[in-house]
Image (spheres, helix red, strand yellow):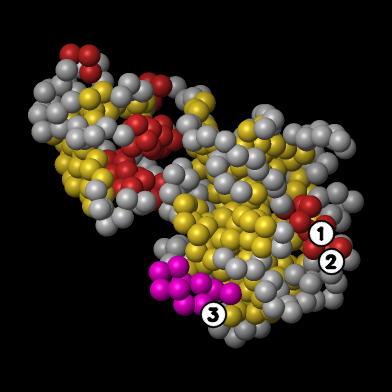
């Protein structure tokens, strides 16, 4: 069991170093397809972090080309300074942070100062300030009738090692400016959201004699035991209606994919291989799964029907494809592209589909791991390590923009979005 767990860990775990909090951006989309917008800060006390988060939200949406200058001005006035007349929109805002947090926004036409949208937001804590900004930008995006960017409002759940044999599960906003520990004490790993509303999540506890899967309500703290198994217990995916789970278990000493029916508590074995099958994901309207297996002698991506039958290879690129995620028929995977036994290796992300062998590179440098699709499949989250720097990264698949936030936390074990 110990050997099996170590081998599974070698496929899925990733070490991150620590550094600052500024973002960098790579732009590949034709700028004429995006709306030019400027930000004007009317807060009593200006906060550069607020401006940076607003800027990041606008950039990664793929729908705006924001002016990067931090303009200061009166939020109540409809006057547009001559320097901003070349913009299409001006977003005036005022953030006030006392015992709680309040945000007022006004979206104006840059040409004549006509108000398009006005709304105020409030939250009783200062820590969740980033979520007010995300909600405001997603509302503006909707008012202008662009495709949804509701994913910016979601939590990221992740597990980090704190000391040997101990870990914590935390929540963050997508920029990681907000972070909160929700599970601590013992070894708690593999958080996986249980529902699209993000009210509950599954996680594995190694506190008892057997690895045990629990479901935690993040709002009231209630916890329910789901199942346990010798060797290994990981929830890697949840069906759309929440009634079934894909589990990686090793009751007989080898890791295989099982499907658990939550109503009946019955388990069905989906893979049966004398090696390692892990990280199952539903694809093709949940009629099939993809997963990582070493059945070729190295880690690669495979698929098979949820009802059983033959297993087929999905990826023909690379010799070590050790992580994947899926959304409908789209697949993103991490592929090792160097073989340095005594130093860092390059892992790049690629996009493919269940019905095609064509691949599209998502990253080109560094070690990129933990790829995760947004709920609508439009954006990919990943963790990048390059040299001694580590970042949380996002790539918008339609605009081909990539946004990197330097990551400031401990060693990450797993992540879900």
Query: Quick one: label 1, few (<14), some, or many (20+) residues within 10 Å?
Result: few
Locate residue 344 relative to residue 45 in the image: left or right: right
Give the magenta part as a residue range.
214-223
Q: Which residue is denoted by mark 1 in the rendering?
A: 6
Locate residue 108 relative to residue 353 in the image: left or right: left
Res 381 visible: yes
Extreme residue toward the top, this view: 82
The residue depicted at 51 percent of the width and 43 percent of the height is: 379
Locate residue 349 relative to residue 121 in the image: left or right: right
Q: Which residue is denoted by mark 2 in the rendering?
A: 2
Asked whether 300 or 168 is in front, the reply is 168
Asked whether 21 or 285 is in front, the reply is 21
Query: Quick one: label 3, few (<14), some, or many (20+) residues within 10 Å?
Result: few
The residue depicted at 75 percent of the width and 34 percent of the height is: 346
Above or below, comparing residue 149 to residue 226 in the picture: above
| Distance between mark 1 and mark 3 Cα atoms | 27 Å
Dot 2 falls on a residue whose secondary structure is helix
**Marks 2 and 1 in Cβ contact (< 8 Å):** yes
Above or below, comparing residue 301 to residue 342 in the picture: below
The residue depicted at 80 percent of the width and 63 percent of the height is: 5
Above or below, comparing residue 242 to residue 159 in the picture: below
| Image coords of residue 241 (percent x, y) | 49, 70
């Amino acid at each position: 069991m110990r050997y099996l767990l170590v081998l599974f860990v070698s496929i899925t775990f990733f070490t991150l170093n620590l550094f600052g909090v500024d973002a960098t951006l790579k732009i590949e989309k034709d700028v004429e397809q995006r709306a030019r917008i400027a930000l004007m800060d009317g807060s009593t006390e200006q906060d550069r972090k607020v401006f940076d988060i607003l800027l990041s939200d606008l950039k990664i949406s793929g729908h705006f080309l924001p002016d990067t200058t931090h303009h200061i001005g009166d939020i109540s006035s409809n006057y547009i300074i001559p320097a901003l007349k070349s913009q299409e929109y001006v977003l005036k805002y005022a953030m006030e942070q006392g015992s709680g947090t309040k945000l007022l926004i006004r979206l104006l036409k840059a040409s004549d100062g006509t108000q398009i949208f006005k709304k105020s937001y409030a939250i009783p804590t200062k820590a969740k300030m980033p979520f007010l900004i995300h909600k405001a930008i997603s509302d503006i995006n909707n008012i202008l009738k662009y495709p949804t960017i509701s994913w910016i409002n979601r939590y990221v759940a992740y597990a980090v090692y704190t000391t040997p044999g101990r870990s914590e599960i935390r929540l963050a906003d997508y920029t990681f400016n907000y972070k909160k520990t929700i599970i601590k004490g013992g070894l708690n790993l593999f958080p996986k959201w249980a529902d699209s509303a993000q009210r509950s999540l599954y996680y594995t506890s190694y506190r008892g004699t057997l690895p045990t899967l629990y479901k935690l309500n993040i709002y009231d703290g209630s916890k329910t035991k789901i199942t346990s198994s010798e060797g290994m217990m990981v929830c890697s995916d949840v069906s759309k209606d929440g009634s079934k789970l894909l589990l990686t278990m090793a009751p007989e000493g080898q890791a295989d994919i099982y499907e658990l029916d939550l109503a009946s508590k019955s388990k069905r074995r989906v893979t049966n291989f004398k090696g390692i099958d892990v990280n199952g994901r539903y694809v093709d309207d949940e009629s099939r799964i993809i997963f990582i297996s070493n059945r070729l002698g190295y880690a690669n991506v495979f698929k098979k029907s949820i009802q059983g039958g033959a297993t087929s290879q999905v990826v023909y690129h690379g010799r070590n494809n050790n992580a994947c995620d899926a959304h409908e028929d789209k697949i993103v995977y991490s592929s090792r592209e160097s073989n340095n036994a005594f130093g860092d290796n390059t892992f790049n992300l690629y996009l493919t589909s269940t019905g095609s062998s064509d691949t599209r590179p998502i990253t080109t440098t560094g070690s990129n791991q933990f790829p995760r699709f947004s709920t609508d499949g439009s954006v990919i989250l990943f963790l990048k390590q390059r040299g001694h720097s580590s970042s949380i990264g996002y790539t918008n698949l339609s605009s081909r923009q990539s946004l990197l936030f330097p990551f400031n936390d401990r060693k990450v074990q797993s992540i879900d979005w």
